[in-house]
Amino acid sequence: MNNHDQHKIPILSFYSGGGFMDMGFEKAGFEIVWTNEVDDVFIKLHAAGITSWRKARGNGIKAEIFNTKSITDITSEKIIEEAFPLEMPKDFGIIGGPPCQDFSMNGNLKGFNGERGKLTVIFFDKILDLRPTFFVMENVTGLTKSSSTKEHLTKLLNRVEKEYFVDHKTLNALDFGVPQFRERVFFIGIRKDKFNDEFRTDSLGKWFAFPLNEQYNGAAERYKWTTTVNYGRKLTKPKGLPLELCVESCLVPTRKLKTTPNAEEYFNLHVEENKLNKIGEGETNRPSFKRLHRFKYSPTACYGNNEVHLHPYKQRRLSVRETLRIQGVEDTYVLPTALSLTKKFKMIGNGVPVPLAEAVANAVKDFITKNKII
């Protein structure tokens, strides 16, 4: 891993989880040289999933989590020593999505005082310490919406903005060809001393060219989506709906269950069948047992407490493979069957959809190339 490709910009990945954001950056031509994750099961899942995915892409570098300590306990010296044992490169990036339940609109809103909220603060501390050429941080939209966290975030960013130009934008995975309505805020920072003097930006940001996918942009409003129907109906796809934005494109047909990795892994339902039959296809405005519609996108995939969405027309929850597909993860990313199902769904739900991560990574690459940052 240490003979880095000369042309690829190295990336340090914090809070790596299943490595979905890493995959997006790797697909855009960056090189992940250091990863960090504390959850021991996520660590094993990450290594297996990314290694199999890379292998299928002709990349023989075995994936591993380089540091398994909490980010609170890792010194910047240690990170540099592990990531760049030979010499410190002139340019590198840092990416990460600090665990964000404390800012989630339906979470506990403890904000920056919560245990997880502190991880966002530490993320910015590490950036100021390590001084990467650029950084990308992903988080829930609650971080910029609730007035209490907004104020604290502004203070945090003021510190960072002494050294970095920072911009942010909320992006929806659905607008990037992923069959899931998932809004997340992305912060991009680029070190000020990397720009030439002509570059001007106001303190409000709005200088970065965030990605836009013309093909799918505004997909939630753009198409006439289907509405709830009774469970068990025969349906045909309405004309004009892109199948790739529908849950149907992610479902594994019965004939392929045996040959599709992770397709037979799902939580058993402990509910009487007649109760389940009453839940309509597309009935997702429920506190639990939300049933997806085959010809609509999935609501945000967030699988806590084993609450995984119900299959549109089968009496079961979605499988590991189906939820991976809803996150835009390719089938070559294979997880070991023996490991905890609860952890798998939690890790999958935490991730950044790969096509969205790739679009952001490409936007960063285009921007730094065009502005001769590197």
Image (cartoon, rainbow, N blue to C red):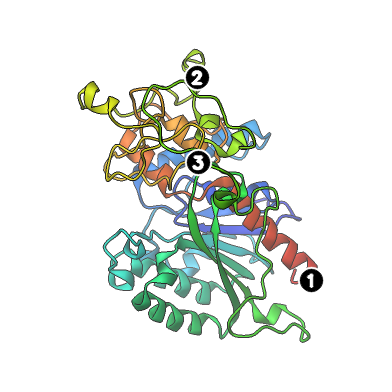
Residue at the (34%, 59%) spot, across then down: 101
Query: Tag 3's secondary structure?
Result: loop
How many residues crowd around disc 3 within 10 Å: few (fewer than 14), some, or many (20 or more)?
many
Marks 2 and 1, how far apart in space?
48 Å
Disc with the residue nearer the chain's start (3 vs 1): 3
Kind of residue at disc 1: Lys
Residue 268 makes an appearance in the image: no
Marks 2 and 3, how far apart in space?
18 Å
Residue at the (29%, 73%) spot, across then down: 113
Specify the label residue 128 is tagged with.
Answer: none
289 vs 222, left or right, is left
Viewer-closest of 231 and 39: 231
Disc with the residue nearer the chain's start (2 vs 3): 2
How many residues crowd around disc 2 within 10 Å: few (fewer than 14), some, or many (20 or more)?
few
User: Which of label 2 and label 3 is nearer to you?
Assistant: 3
In the rendered image, residue 213, in percent from the top left (x then y), is placed at 68, 53
Kind of residue at disc 3: Tyr
Q: Which residue is mark 1?
A: 372
Q: Which residue is mark 3?
A: 297
Specify the label residue 253 is tagged with.
Answer: 2
